[in-house]
Image: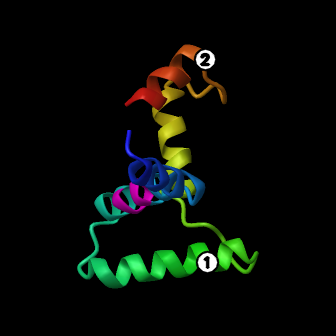
Amino acid sequence: MAAGEEQSREYLQRHRLPELLHRLGALLLFHRPERPREFLIQVLERVKAGRRAEGEYPFLMDEDNVDAMFSLLDVLGQGHIRPAQYREGAST
């Protein structure tokens, strides 16, 4: 591998850019905003504020989404799910 390519990989990893780009892409596909550039700017501003402990990091799912997913897995309403159910839900 060429030195320049290795430096590029190290740069990407050091700044965790692949994870950031993946999350941004997932947020775009989940929310499908009418104005994607403005949406991305808002998300990045929230990330910046969250790093300064001034706000929350933008999550793909909120509490309502988690509750809905849990209720789909807890079909008997027992208040808990088995590890196999968790793995199945996490893989979909």
**Image coordinates for residue 36, horizontal then vertical, percent:** 28, 77
Write the residue at 42% across / 82% down. Answer: 41
Label 2 to label 1: alpha-carbon separation? 35 Å
Q: Which of the 4 image quarters holds residue 4?
A: bottom left
Write the residue at 54% across / 36% down. Answer: 70
Examine the rendered structure and indicate whether residue 35 appears above or below residue 13: below
Residue type, label 2:
Pro
> Mark 1 or mark 2, which is nearer the start of the sequence?
1
Write the residue at 54% across / 58% down. Answer: 62
Quarter that holds the C terminus: top left
Examine the rendered structure and indicate whether residue 52 appears above or below residue 70: below
41 sits to left or right of 16:
left
Q: Look at discs 2 and 1 and give the one toward the viewer.
A: 1
8 sits to left or right of 77:
left
For residue 83, the mark is: 2
Write the residue at 38% across / 45% down. Answer: 2
**Image coordinates for residue 43, horizontal then vertical, percent:** 48, 75
Residue type, label 1:
Lys
For label 1, the residue is 48
Q: Residues within 10 Å of mark 2 (few under 14, many from 20)?
A: few
Q: Nearer the viewer, residue 2 or 43?
A: 2
Quarter that holds the N terminus: top left
Where are the magenta residues, as a range? Answer: 21-25
Q: Main secondary structure of the magenta part?
A: helix
